[in-house]
């Protein structure tokens, strides 16, 4: 089969298209014929060598959608539509950047849809992360205000739509003024240009601060996000777009406002259910959600897609169609 293999840690050109043996299915695992997969920022970090424990060569890809080719357990029928996400896929075992993959049953979610494969490919990881961050970690409620830091990311764009559908007021950030219009068209109420210090700009819009912050830029802006919250507000760090993993001299008593809350969301397949996934796919099918797919690549173009992501040219999700 054909696969995009990350041959060693490095720049996008370390990803090479190769003919590799078909994966062998073990008990408790299934063989999936991959139809499409979304690209994820974490795969860029892994490719650079920033994921301790990931050894190369590796077929990356923490998610995929496709059809069951073989399931020794008989849980799924041949040809059934499925998605697979996380659970060390594309990290400790080979993942989605290929024509076929084997994954454990526990990370496989069946669904039914007539949507195109490239559309469905955009969904699993983006939806799981967005839904988990907003509903489970931030526990968003109608009437609240939400700041999305890293608003033009695929997670940021979808979060805005889900929050608006639930009746929140949303501020989205970007560092690039040229992306302002795209954020407004995606439904945000306010755009703030992020120069790293935006707490005052947020308080010009909401003088008492915002109720909730979805922090996708990460540690580089976290202190400032904590300064943006209202009394008993919550910040959830879900992303690390700023590419920095720790905060020097973080002082909880000083950096977290009194009674403010700081949490994180580190999603996994266990945070998704087949019912939630199907419900969301149905909403997309009805036209109630715009997935903001920025560009669809072929398997041969995975290295180009990684460069595109690295250059921050996307305003939404990048998908590869097999
Ligand atoms: N916790 C979890 O379970 C989980 C799961 C999935 C993803 N994530 C994380 O969620 C974040 C968003 O993922 P994604 O795939 O949606 O990202 P993405 O679409 O690739 O995000 C692209 C955007 O990130 C912004 N950006 C890039 N570098 C930045 C920097 N140094 N500082 C500030 N902004 C920067 C750029 O926005 P502008 O140019 O407009 O500023 C760019 O348009 C990532 O950090 C990802 O690792 C977490």
Image (cartoon, rainbow, N blue to C red):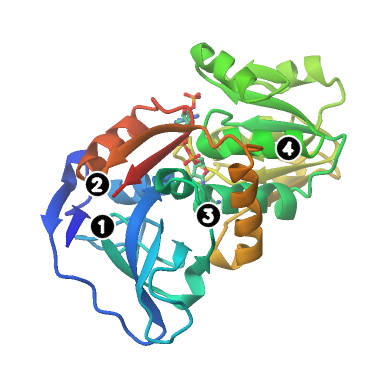
Name the secondary structure under disc 3: loop
Of label 1 and label 3, which has the lower sequence position?
Answer: 1
State the image coordinates of residue 204 (x, y, percent, origin top left). Answer: 79, 14
Of labels 4 and 2, the one closer to you? 2
Position above or below: 42 against 213: below
CB contact under 8 Å: marks 3 and 4: no
Name the secondary structure under disc 4: helix
Furthest toward the left, the residue is 19
Residue holding disc 2: 299
Quarter holding residue 218: top right
- The crowding category of the residue bearing disc 1, from other C-alpha atoms within 10 Å (few below 14, some 14 to 19, many at least 20), is many
Residue holding disc 3: 113
- The crowding category of the residue bearing disc 3, from other C-alpha atoms within 10 Å (few below 14, some 14 to 19, many at least 20), is few
**Could you tell me which residue is drawn at 65 percent across and 18 percent down?**
191
Residue holding disc 1: 98
Furthest toward the front, the residue is 114
Q: Nearer the viewer, residue 73 or 28?
A: 73
CB contact under 8 Å: marks 1 and 2: yes
CB contact under 8 Å: marks 1 and 4: no
């Amino acid at each position: 089969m054909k696969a995009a293999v990350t041959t060693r840690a490095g720049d996008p050109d370390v990803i090479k298209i190769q003919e590799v043996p078909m994966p062998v299915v073990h008990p408790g695992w299934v063989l999936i014929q991959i139809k499409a997969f979304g690209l994820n920022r974490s795969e860029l970090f892994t490719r650079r060598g920033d994921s301790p424990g990931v050894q190369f060569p590796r077929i990356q890809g923490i998610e995929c959608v496709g059809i069951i080719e073989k399931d020794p357990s008989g849980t799924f029928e041949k040809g059934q539509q499925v998605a697979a996400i996380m659970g060390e896929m594309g990290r400790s075992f080979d993942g989605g950047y290929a024509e076929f993959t084997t994954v454990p049953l526990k990370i496989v979610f069946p669904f039914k849809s007539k949507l195109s494969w490239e559309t469905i490919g955009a969904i699993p990881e983006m939806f799981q992360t967005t839904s988990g961050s907003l509903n489970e970690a931030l526990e968003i409620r109608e009437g609240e205000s939400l700041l999305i830091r890293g608003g033009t990311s695929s997670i940021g764009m979808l979060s805005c739509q889900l929050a608006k559908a639930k009746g929140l007021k949303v501020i989205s950030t970007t560092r690039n003024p040229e992306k302002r219009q795209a954020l407004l068209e995606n439904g945000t109420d306010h755009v703030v240009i992020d120069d790293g210090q935006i707490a005052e700009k947020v308080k010009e819009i909401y003088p008492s601060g915002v109720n909730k912050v979805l922090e996708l830029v990460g540690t580089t802006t976290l202190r400032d996000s904590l300064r943006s919250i209202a009394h008993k507000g919550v910040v959830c760090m879900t992303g690390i777009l700023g590419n920095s993993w720790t905060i020097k001299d973080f002082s909880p008593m000083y950096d977290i406002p009194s009674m403010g809350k700081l949490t994180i969301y580190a999603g996994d397949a266990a945070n998704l259910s087949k019912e939630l996934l199907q419900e969301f796919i149905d909403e997309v099918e009805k036209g109630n959600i715009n997935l903001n797919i920025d560009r669809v690549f072929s398997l041969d173009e995975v290295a180009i897609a990684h460069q595109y992501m690295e250059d921050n040219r996307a305003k939404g999700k990048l998908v590869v169609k097999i």
